[in-house]
Image (spheres, grey):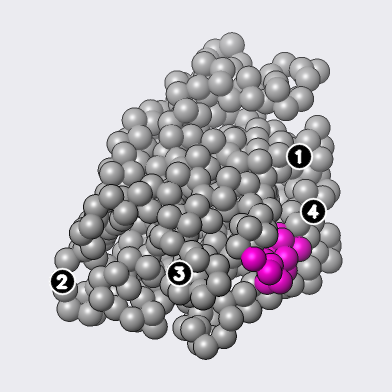
Amino acid sequence: MNSTPGTPATAARTGPAVALGLVILCIEGYDLFILGAVGPSLLSHPDWDVTKSTLGLLGSLTALGMPLGSIAAGWAGDLYGRRLPMVISLAWLSVSMLLSAVAPDLTLFAATRFLTGMGIGALIPLVTAYVSEAATPARHSLQVGTATTGLAIGGILTGVVGRTLLPEWDFRTLFLFGAIPLALIPVVWRLVPAVVRDRTARAPLDEAEADTAAEAIPSAGEPHDSANRLRQLLAPQYRRSTLLFWAATFAGLVIVYGASTWLPTLMVDSGYDLGSSLEFSIAFNVGAVIGTIGAALVADRGLLKAATIVSFLLAAVAMITLSTPQPRPLLLVASAVAGFGALGTQALVNIYVAHAHPARLRGTALGFSLGVGRVGAIAGPSYLAAVTVLISSSKAGFYAFVVPALLGAVLIGLLRPGRRPSAAAPSAAPSEAPLVQ
């Protein structure tokens, strides 16, 4: 494996890594929220005969490609380094978005969304792992969290562009911005190292989690193939945390992809016009940016678990608030809190996964966590579509978010500290020990 654990990243590398990660995820966030922004325009398209069920299916098709991208990219990133898989993923995402812009009918448009999903799925674990390895130990959560706010910033750009161009322009115009990732390929090739590098130490998640097991480290010469990495993630020292991370990611992505596909449409159904609904979408993403950075600052004080649980609960409270008649300023605040509870929560879960695994397993752990959790991304839009179709109340869609939010809080709460280091492995490097179980 192309890995050099224990080799510190230089201080000069941290800033560019965070900035590059933020820009890449900004593009990804733009594409993540674009289907929600064009949803009302799709529903009113004169030739494509799009229904709410069709819109849910389009969101699920996008998400269907994501597990393939996440698992493949996470494995490739650990095996070959982050640079080459990241370049390929950017090119794939760009071409797919441009194909969406020129799709002549609904069938081909749906196919391009599936291909786009593969590119989106690939980039998140690669970028999270890359920034995590460049991050300063004492500011790990803040720096990784700052990069992951790119998803929300991209969502803000989607809302601004959508509010400016729609409904006067053809909705496919918004997909032309897919050419931008191509311009980042030379930057990625220059800045991203060809091999995986890691800090020699990282800040603890919780006080109790600082003392962790060292017996998870494979013996010298142990093979590092992808099947072996998966076996390590499901070995006794990682199994509990692995399964809980997978399930929590599922719950988080139901919220993220349900909201990204349906929030503007739900607001229209509640009586707001398209422009107003896109304002709520912008507030949703502004809240995700501010909330994620604030929660990351708390997490770096050893409270990552508590911050993640609270953010799940805030998502539930915000969605309940959005379902009720409230003054417009309060609804905008609730939408911002919902954004933190959705995108911010998933960012914290990803930080938790990255922080809980050594460099040799980080990409694979993130890839499988996001890959398996992507079932939630696949189910989320269709789940919301089913609820809104089966239950006529305009509140039903908002209440549908409460169940996965409460489930996610419970799952993170079940994570427990790792066992104390065993006497049998006193020389294990601290960055190679699991931080949770």
Q: Residues within 10 Å of mark 1 (few under 14, many from 20)?
A: many
Q: Is residue 205 above or below residue 347?
A: above
Q: Residues within 10 Å of mark 2 (few under 14, many from 20)?
A: few
Whichever of labels 1 and 4 marks the residue nearer the N terminus, that label is: 1
Q: Is residue 35 above or below residue 346?
A: below
Q: x and y percent of residue 280 in the render? A: 35, 74
Identify the residue position indicated by label 1 in the image. 76
Q: Is residue 188 visible?
A: no
**Under tag 2, what secondary structure?**
loop
Residue drawn at (57%, 85%) of the image: 169
Identify the residue position indicated by label 4 in the image. 88
Identify the residue position indicated by label 2 in the image. 325
Identify which amino acid the numbered label 4 is placed on: Ile
Structural distance between the alpha carbons of marks 2 and 3:
25 Å
CB atoms of marks 4 and 3 within 8 Å = no
**Under tag 4, what secondary structure?**
helix
Q: x and y percent of residue 226 in the render? A: 72, 27
Mark 2, mark 1: which one is toward the viewer?
2
Q: x and y percent of residue 208 in the render? A: 38, 32
Identify the residue position indicated by label 3 in the image. 43
| Of 394 and 52, the residue lying toward us | 52
Whichever of labels 2 and 4 marks the residue nearer the N terminus, that label is: 4
> Which range of residues does the magenta coloring cover?
93-105
356 relative to 303 in the view: left or right: right
Q: Residues within 10 Å of mark 4 (few under 14, many from 20)?
A: some
Identify which amino acid the numbered label 1 is placed on: Ala
**Under tag 1, what secondary structure?**
helix
Residue drawn at (35%, 35%) of the image: 411
| Of 153 and 324, the residue lying toward us | 324
Q: x and y percent of residue 126 in the render? A: 67, 49
Structural distance between the alpha carbons of marks 2 and 4:
47 Å
Residue 368 belongs to the span the image colors magenta: no
